[in-house]
Amino acid sequence: MKFGLKGKLAKKESRLEAIRDAHSVQGRTSHTYRMEDYLEVIYELIKEKGYASAVDISEYLNVSSPSVTKMMQRLDESGHLNYEKYRGIMLTDQGASVAKSMHERHNLLVEFLKMIGVKDEVANRDAEGIEHHLHPETLKKLEQFVKYWKKGKKANK
Amino acid sequence: MKFGLKGKLAKKESRLEAIRDAHSVQGRTSHTYRMEDYLEVIYELIKEKGYASAVDISEYLNVSSPSVTKMMQRLDESGHLNYEKYRGIMLTDQGASVAKSMHERHNLLVEFLKMIGVKDEVANRDAEGIEHHLHPETLKKLEQFVKYWKKGKKANK
DNA sequence: TATCAAAGTTAGCTTGGGCTAAACTAATAA
DNA sequence: TTATTAGTTTAGCCCAAGCTAACTTTGATA
């Protein structure tokens, strides 16, 4: 496997042009980063306790319960979960898929960060911030890279 | 140099606890991520053309000019730049320092991403998203790591 | 020097996400 | 069965950041 040796053929962009490209609107996903955070917590709660209550969500995201309620309504609206007042919360397939994706990104990022020597706590915090911003390609490459690195480590341990 | 071999002594946290820690409020920096974007563009504009005009900022950030004006007022307020209506924009030391930090983070991230095989365009876009979320420690480790890796590459080229 | 286009600004609105205070539900204990 | 209370929701607010429409300033040119 080769890294970092791609053909340098691309038209060289000025830094400003690169910034413009990066900030050009480009098919955002119908949900916000904050929604991803909520979905991730709900997913973990369901995995750990079987259900997700508003108090728990509010505790783990460090927000008030009215904020949770509001977001539940939005996520219901957007089809990420089925929500019935005073009853409960269930992830839809769509919601679960977003949540799972976040979960995996998080794991991968934490693994990588620890690998390069970042302390657990910081790794976790940074991963939580970064996970929303990864292009699928980046994800794939990072995955390959981590796998590759681990193999190497094992090889000369 | 060693990576990934830190003592595994830390108390093992549940995933939810980790999420809570990550989302616990913790000394945010008196400026927002969006401010960082503006400051970065202003910095690059000044480097490339000697000054930063509102139209340019608005073009490179893909926002309207009233949005730029508003943000200039805020950044003036917060001491990141000196702004005088219809006149011009100058970064203060504080503003320049934030901008420079973004610039460096961006460079480092792009370098790393390309290193693992991510295409330029994607690397740029992801870096732009990620750069706001890096703890100084992560930054330092990533830097060491990139340096280390490059050395390795050179060694067996 | 007067005019006019381009650049910048203000006014006033929208939206996402957050909060507190107050009202409501539901489930348990008496 | 009723009363209490923990949990949830509503109402009504705030703030950052965005937008369009309308206005002002500046500077170049006739």
Image: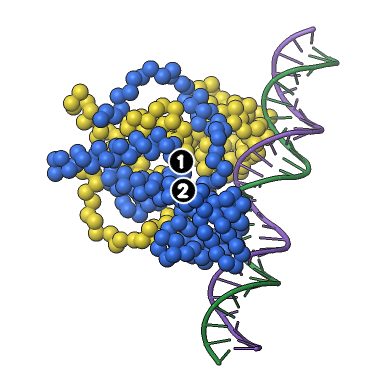
Chain colours: A blue, B yellow, C green, D purple
- Name the amino acid type tagged 1: His
- Mark 1 → mark 2, Cα distance in angstroms: 17 Å
- In the image, residue A95 sits, relative to residue B13, either above or below, namely above
> On the rendered image, what quadrant is the C terminus of chain A found in?
top left
Q: Which mark, by number, is residue B17? A: none
Residue drawn at (14%, 40%), measured in percent from left and top?
A156
Q: Position of residue A44 (x, y in %)?
A: 43, 58
> Which is more foreground, mark 1 or mark 2?
2
Q: Residue at left 34%, top 30%?
A: B117
- Neighbourhood count class around disc 1 (C-alpha, 10 Å): few under 14, some 14–19, many 20 upward: some
Earlier along the polypeptide chain: callout 1 or callout 2?
2
For residue B143, what is the image quadrant?
top left
In the rendered image, residue A118, in percent from the top left (x then y), is placed at 31, 48
Q: Residue placed at 51% from the left, 65% from the top?
A: A53
Q: Are the residues under badges 1 and 2 in a single subunit?
A: yes
Query: Residue B37 appears at what percent x and percent y?
Result: 52, 36
Give B101 or A15, whichever is nearer the viewer: A15
Left or right side of A100 for B32: right
> Under tag 1, what secondary structure?
helix
Q: Position of residue B51 (x, y in %)?
A: 56, 25
Question: Image quadrant for the N terminus of chain A?
Answer: top left
Report the residue marked by disc 1: A133
Chain assignment, label 1:
A
- Residue A97, labelled with which disc? 2
The chain letter under disc 2 is A
